[in-house]
Amino acid sequence: MEREEEKGKKKEENEGIKRKEEGGFASEDIFRYFRLGVFIILMLLLLVAIFQFYFLALGTISALFEYEYRSLVQAGFVACVIAVVVYLLRAVIVKEK
């Protein structure tokens, strides 16, 4: 049974090598590259949106609060942003393991 599986894997690998040698891509490769490209584009858009939100929120804090309390409120906002980023990074790292 294991030998049949090994033969099947080797056959699939050989077919993949033949396709790549012929200069073509497997449809799975094209779909994977497409998904990767879409993911990168969306991450860049998300990064721009996060920076805009961050600086607009700081501007709003400056407009709403008295001069004496701006630093305190901004520090609280930045601390919340840091906490959320650390939480998300931990979730990603734990998911990878």
Image: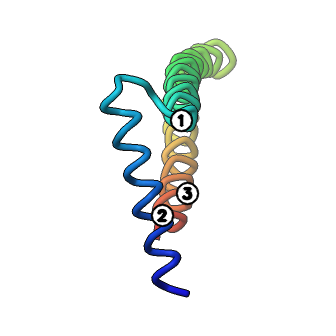
* Residue bearing mark 1: 32
- Label 2: element kind: helix
What residue is drawn where x is 34% and y is 43%?
Answer: 17
* Residue bearing mark 3: 87
Q: Which mark, residue 96? A: 2
Q: Of 92 and 66, which appears nearest the observer?
A: 92
Q: Amino acid at mark 2?
A: Glu
Q: Earlier in the sequence, mark 1 or mark 2?
A: 1
Q: Determine crowd level at label 3: few under 14, some 14-19, many 20+ residues with C-alpha closer than 10 A.
A: few
Q: How far apart in space, not on screen, are marks 1 and 2 (Cα)? A: 19 Å
- Label 3: element kind: helix
Q: Residue furthest left?
A: 21
Q: How far apart in space, not on screen, are marks 1 and 3 (Cα)? A: 28 Å
- Which of the 4 image quadrants contains residue 11? bottom left
What residue is drawn where x is 35% and y is 33%?
Answer: 20
Q: Position of residue 82 (x, y in %)?
A: 48, 46
